[in-house]
Image: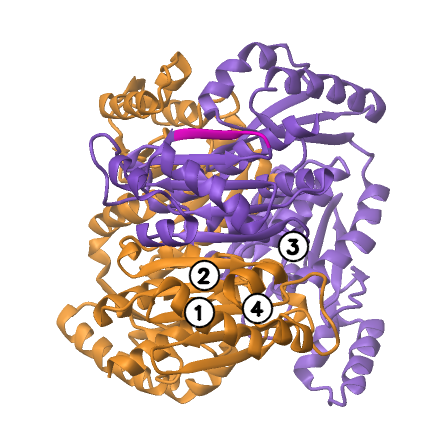
Chain colours: A orange, B purple
Amino acid sequence: MILINIGDELLIGQVINTNAAFIGQQLAAAGYELTDVITIGDDGETIRKTLDSAFAKTDVVLMTGGLGPTKDDITKKVICDYFHRELVIDESTLKWVTELFAARGMELTETNRQQAAVPQGCIVLPNTLGTAPGMWIEQDDKVLVSLPGVPFEMERLIKDEVMPRLHARCNQQGDILYKVLQCTNITESGLSDLLEEYESQLPSELKLAYLPKPGIIRLRLTARGDDPKALATTLDEQFEKLKQLTAEYAFTDEDIEMEEVVGRLLVKAGKKIATAESCTGGYIAHLITSVPGSSRYFEGSLVSYSNDIKRDLLNVREDNLKRRGAVSEPVVSDMALNAMGLFDVDYTIATSGIAGPDGGTPEKPVGTVWVAVATPVRLITHEFRFGSRMGRKQIIERAARAALNMLRIEIEKDLR
Amino acid sequence: MILINIGDELLIGQVINTNAAFIGQQLAAAGYELTDVITIGDDGETIRKTLDSAFAKTDVVLMTGGLGPTKDDITKKVICDYFHRELVIDESTLKWVTELFAARGMELTETNRQQAAVPQGCIVLPNTLGTAPGMWIEQDDKVLVSLPGVPFEMERLIKDEVMPRLHARCNQQGDILYKVLQCTNITESGLSDLLEEYESQLPSELKLAYLPKPGIIRLRLTARGDDPKALATTLDEQFEKLKQLTAEYAFTDEDIEMEEVVGRLLVKAGKKIATAESCTGGYIAHLITSVPGSSRYFEGSLVSYSNDIKRDLLNVREDNLKRRGAVSEPVVSDMALNAMGLFDVDYTIATSGIAGPDGGTPEKPVGTVWVAVATPVRLITHEFRFGSRMGRKQIIERAARAALNMLRIEIEKDLR
């Protein structure tokens, strides 16, 4: 398969091509081979030539970008020319776009209407997050998939519309099964050392991949072969081995986020939670509330960014603030314990740290974060040192996920 | 010019291709036109064919990656085959690599020694930050530049070694200048309609591009030509026109986030802020605190996710909650006004809405969000309807940026 990303903004480096990485991950996870990623500008002739050379090498070409309603977006016209088709209005898309504008109290202009125009005979992939639909065009045993370049619109279309259709089309290649195990509190190379022997004993039809993201390593075990039943058995066996070897670090064997793991545990335990955040600035509350249904277990958060708010609203002892500083064990302990009563909950998380780039000292360098987790019967504290060269957003993200992981371990203990 | 990035890790999306963006920026800033960025795997035959098709289109090809000492790095061999040259040891590189290893107290193995091997007759570009040197090869009026894929090594080589040589070889083809204007509260197609006439009157050396992200459209006006002074004047003139036409929607003419715009205004005004968040769940606080130095103006946030917390900690009137529901104008008004006193600040933002996927009703469908902004002298409220099919994360993100934009407008009024 070949991916073509269209957009002048990519060529001049104004936008980093994260779409290519996302699509590459999705295809690799499903066992498809992406051989080329080609970035070109919004130029009709270039797009046409690139399509030509791509289809000379492969049967399936994915394309992103150039589908907006504006002048510089010319992909649809080029596709019509290329496949000798007319541009026609797709009624279901027109209905969707019309409704979308009506819901926002806006009138549909002719430009908006053109968003519903697609090459005749293509399969329209509905874009529920925007106005430009995706398009799946088959001709002479070739497939062209054209998607909008806006990352979140493209991502949903890939997952919900493109992957199932690729699976249906490419079935003949044999089966691909995979399982995911997510680990934290260990580096990629640490995990690789731990699993060296395990990897070398894997049967040839199984492959282990390391997919790191900030603070988390996703392990993907992929099995590929012709006998789906035998394949599933082998995969299950080897996945169990993998789980045992990584028991200390693995936090879920599903492809979900840490905050969803924590949410499920809270529902299971029938318990409620609140957070008291300083350096994470509300990011933990945001992660928790990004999970649908989190109102069942999340009461709220006090983001106490200044020392005044820590003292006045969270009853952090002045003495602790003065003697030990805001980034200290006694202060996060006060925050976590007092938040319990304030929000009337069973568990709390508190954070205080130095996210940088300024504010570090030799004793408390940028990247120092104290986390406290209070449970009905325990108070656990931990000092993290994420390092000063990581950057503010990374430190906040790492601290939030590390804090959620501390909470996860405590709830799991209490559920036993 | 064409850029070829080599590396399996790029194709499977394990690494985001930031090298392409860096090189794109450097070339664009110097006025060179990059027409294609091609990512391929560590495969000799593919590299050879890609070189062939690239040199069929352009005289200058830049290449990154595949120069490391490991088995799958085969770029140098392919280059030798391609240009019919021998691989020879470059003495200055061998000296550098030997010294580097000696300084680390390590012995030089045969594999390390091969790092100093280069195609005969090439210009070696010394890599002061690593072991693999860059290479500049000229043959039959074509130039191939091969660089290591490690970003900081490649970046230094581009700046110090490649750009000066490109300038010496190529007659400066002209300059590229651009400016960015960011708009909100308008759709891409609405903006496109508004700017139809403007776009058609643009001189041919100027181009307008629409770069949407959730709730925001970035407009990039690019100018390309031979006379940098005249170009800058034309760009300035047309950019002023653009600003006037979009005055109602533009919130910054810099390439920064909404939360940074708000932060700068608060610093300028010498005022403080807090938030009281329900449906946004701490995301506004997170956006504000993701800006370095935000502790100067951000006191904190009360995320009041449950009605109990709204009533007990934010003094929202029971009567309003019961009669009008949590997602209502009186409730967000109570939240915003009472947060002023609680946090002792000059401005507050309050949100309450239905982020979904559940909880919608016919009167208050999913996507309904009430926002209140309290200032020292005013209370502003607004009901947003983001539409139910947008998805939870999108609704939270849109609501947060819309709320920050409401605040921005008020602070700007107060600063006048």
Per the image, the residue denoted by label 4 is A352
Q: Do labels 1 and 2 touch, CB within 8 Å? A: yes
Question: How packed is label 1: few (under 14 Cα within 10 Å), some, or many (20 or more)?
Answer: many
* Dot 2: chain letter: A
Question: How packed is label 3: few (under 14 Cα within 10 Å), some, or many (20 or more)?
Answer: some
Per the image, the residue denoted by label 1 is A349
Per the image, the residue denoted by label 3 is B295
Question: How packed is label 4: few (under 14 Cα within 10 Å), some, or many (20 or more)?
Answer: many
What element does badge 4 sit on?
strand
Q: Is residue A59 visible?
A: no
Q: Which mark is residue A284?
A: 2
- Please say if B285 is above or below A114: below
* Dot 1: chain letter: A
Q: Do labels 4 and 2 touch, CB within 8 Å? A: no
Q: Residue furthest left?
A: A229
Number of residue marks: 4
Mark 4 → mark 3, Cα distance in angstroms? 13 Å
